[in-house]
Image (cartoon, helix red, strand yellow):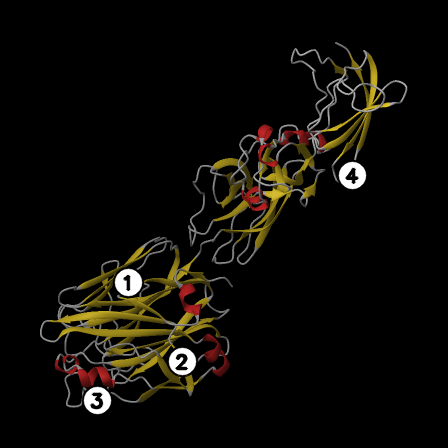
């Protein structure tokens, strides 16, 4: 069973949530063979016009009696009273904490604002374990409010009470739509009416249709314009609930009129709703009495499907640029099958890309598996949203009247994904002073070894930037790193698919370039054999005789400073040989020849 919830997420937070003057609105809806009953009692000893009306009882009880065929699906406990909320009470010895709190204010012209509260707790597990029993409710304490604020008793608007709602499933029941509306709203001489509109109904058969409500502070002796209407028809349940006194301290489930300062009532409405109706309006009015509405329940025989979509899985193939999506069409929250050939539309980022239909009738609580494949090579975005909408002809328009028109779709965000783990590349090297070394990062394109034609390459300084596509290197052909060595990342992407590479930038000594000609004639061209790197230099003639010894500070100028030649005298024209020992870590030795001419 799947239950449609509008506010149910609030119930399971574990703590209570204070809601002020919450409008009566749809809280939960059950579609299937469901009905409900309610028990409860007041803690007022008499109506608010007797001699002991301001004395509140410490406990009260009521009996739950279900048939063997009736299985408890949900059980909800409500309690309410004057003043600020008492959020912890006891039911059959079990401590119950509020899941929800509601508060309303009555602005008394004499005593100022008088707050009233209602609390709600999901007690399904407890009631399922206990079952039929006499339920004793206790430990609701409003004494502080009554003792510290005389307005409650002076206005005769003090009250406390409780009710247990039980929703059950019975295979003998027809297919019903049971709707629970709840909140807390006041109607009084200023706000004299409350309207609740029912939508998405489809009355198949009006037999057994009913409406019930839980209200507080009603008095039998105040009956001016006090009505409950459905589709402008005044409802009544005489003699317990006459048409002009809807809020008169009665419990029509137990057929008693001593539910003082509260009403727990249910009405048959089969004469006030028609087969084929898709909407209905409930109205509650009062002319003199202060009435606090806590919930309204409708039970209508219905025949409607409820199309919903669940995306099961997806996979992306970056090699073929295709994605496969598997999804299910459900009919869980329904009272009628989904017919065959019901259309489904598939959108990507708002654009229609495909359509399908159900192949067979989908029964109540049934489902049908579907899947589709699409090519995303033309999608340039690094993420896109797939939106699958059932009962959609491709233009946002459906073909079915459903229980809930708001749950027909499911979305899936497909985001950028790496094809493989981050892959290393050989380092790039460059020489020069560290502060001025420049790298051409695009040289790595020749080293990737994968054909990425049509893909977009972008370089980044950090892995986080590469993953998030932030702070790209804007001029990779002329990149000046702020420190060496350093890692650089390359992201090659197309649409949602990408591959990350990493490589290191390192500095190396620039290669030594030694000219092969020397002409020391004073013209400023090749007058010296200049070698910028620190080194030791030796020059030999063609007979292997050492003729000159120098270094970076004493370059060869074509003269001799060793051997039999006169120091400082230019040597004869011819070929000479050099030996250069670099002052680097490896102690490189460079050998070669140079031609001396003038």
Which mark is in front, 1 or 2? 2
The local secondary structure at tag 2 comes to strand
In whole angstroms, how far apart are the C-alphas of marks 2 and 3?
Answer: 24 Å
Q: Is residue 217 above or below residue 310?
A: below
Which mark identifies residue 417?
Answer: none
Q: Which residue is mark 4?
A: 586
Q: Which residue is mark 3?
A: 55
x and y percentages locating residue 18 in the rendered image? 32, 69
What is the crowding at mark 2: few (fewer than 14 residues within 10 Å), some, or many (at least 20)? Answer: some
Q: Earlier in the sequence, mark 1 or mark 4?
A: 1
Say which residue appears at 68% left-offset and 35% top-offset. Answer: 428
Which mark is in front, 2 or 3? 2
Say which residue appears at 21% left-offset and 71% top-offset. Answer: 291
In whole angstroms, how far apart are the C-alphas of marks 2 and 4?
Answer: 83 Å
Q: Which residue is mark 1?
A: 23
In whole angstroms, how far apart are the C-alphas of marks 1 and 2?
Answer: 24 Å
Instruction: Inspect this view and state whether residue 210 appears.
Output: yes
Horizontally, residue 39 falls left or right of residue 43, namely right
Name the image quarter holding residue 250.
bottom left
Q: Earlier in the sequence, mark 2 or mark 4?
A: 2
Q: Which quadrant holds the C terminus? A: top right
Name the image quarter holding residue 85.
bottom left
Q: Earlier in the sequence, mark 3 or mark 1?
A: 1
x and y percentages locating residue 345 in the rendered image? 51, 40
In whole angstroms, how far apart are the C-alphas of marks 1 and 4?
Answer: 85 Å
Say which residue appears at 64% left-offset and 36% top-offset. Answer: 321
Which mark is in front, 4 or 3? 4
What is the crowding at mark 3: few (fewer than 14 residues within 10 Å), some, or many (at least 20)? Answer: some
């Amino acid at each position: 069973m799947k239950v449609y919830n509008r506010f149910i997420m609030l119930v399971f937070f574990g703590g209570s949530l204070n809601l002020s003057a919450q409008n009566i609105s749809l809280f939960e809806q059950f579609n299937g063979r469901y009905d409900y009953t309610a028990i409860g009692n007041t803690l007022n000893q008499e109506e608010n016009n007797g001699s002991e009306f301001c004395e509140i009882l410490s406990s009260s009880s009521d009996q739950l009696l279900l048939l063997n065929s009736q299985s408890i699906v949900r059980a909800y406990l409500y309690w309410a009273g004057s003043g600020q909320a008492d959020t912890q009470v006891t039911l059959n010895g079990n401590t119950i904490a509020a899941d929800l709190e509601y508060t309303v204010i009555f602005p008394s012209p004499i005593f100022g604002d008088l707050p009233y509260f209602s609390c709600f707790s999901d007690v399904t597990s407890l009631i399922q374990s206990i079952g039929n029993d006499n339920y004793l409710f206790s430990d609701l304490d409003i004494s502080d409010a009554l003792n510290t604020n005389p307005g409650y008793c002076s206005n005769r608007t003090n009250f406390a009470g409780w009710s247990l709602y039980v929703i059950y499933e019975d295979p003998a029941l027809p297919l019903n739509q049971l709707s629970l509306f709840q909140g807390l709203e006041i109607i009084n001489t200023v706000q004299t009416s409350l309207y609740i509109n029912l939508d998405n109904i489809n009355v198949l058969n009006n037999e057994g249709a009913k409406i019930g409500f839980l209200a507080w502070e009603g008095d039998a002796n105040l009956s001016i314009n006090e009505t409950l209407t459905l589709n402008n028809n005044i409802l009544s349940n005489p003699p317990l609930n006459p048409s002009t006194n809807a809020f008169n301290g009665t419990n029509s489930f137990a057929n008693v009129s001593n539910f003082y300062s509260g009403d727990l009532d249910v009405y048959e409405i089969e004469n006030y709703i028609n087969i084929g109706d898709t909407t209905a309006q409930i109205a509650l009015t009062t002319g003199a009495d202060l009435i606090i509405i806590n919930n309204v329940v409708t039970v209508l025989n219905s025949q409607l499907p409820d199309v919903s979509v669940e995306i099961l899985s997806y996979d992306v193939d970056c090699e073929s640029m295709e994605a496969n999506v598997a999804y299910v069409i459900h009919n869980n929250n329904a009272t009628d099958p989904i017919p065959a050939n019901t259309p489904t539309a598939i959108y990507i980022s708002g654009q229609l890309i495909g359509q399908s239909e159900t192949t067979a009738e989908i029964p109540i609580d049934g489902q049908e598996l579907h899947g589709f494949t699409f090519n995303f090579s033309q999608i340039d975005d690094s993420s896109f949203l797939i939106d699958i909408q059932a009962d959609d002809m491709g233009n946002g328009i459906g073909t079915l009247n459903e229980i809930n028109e708001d749950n027909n779709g499911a979305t899936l965000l497909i985001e950028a994904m790496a094809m493989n783990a981050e892959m290393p590349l050989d380092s790039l090297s460059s020489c020069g002073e560290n502060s001025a070394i420049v790298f051409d990062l695009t040289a790595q394109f020749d080293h990737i070894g994968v054909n990425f034609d049509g893909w977009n390459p972008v370089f980044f300084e950090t892995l986080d930037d590469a993953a998030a596509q932030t702070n790209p290197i804007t001029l990779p052909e002329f990149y000046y790193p702020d420190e060496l060595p350093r890692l650089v990342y390359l992201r090659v992407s197309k649409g949602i698919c990408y591959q990350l590479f990493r490589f290191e930038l390192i500095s190396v000594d620039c290669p030594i370039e030694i000219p092969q000609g020397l002409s020391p004639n004073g013209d400023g061209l090749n007058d010296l054999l200049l070698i910028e790197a620190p080194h030791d230099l030796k020059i030999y003639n063609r007979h292997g005789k050492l003729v000159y010894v120098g270094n970076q500070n004493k370059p060869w100028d074509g003269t001799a400073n060793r051997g039999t030649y006169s120091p400082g005298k230019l040597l004869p024209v011819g070929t000479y040989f050099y030996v250069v020992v670099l002052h680097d870590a490896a102690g490189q030795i460079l050998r070669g020849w140079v031609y001396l001419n003038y």
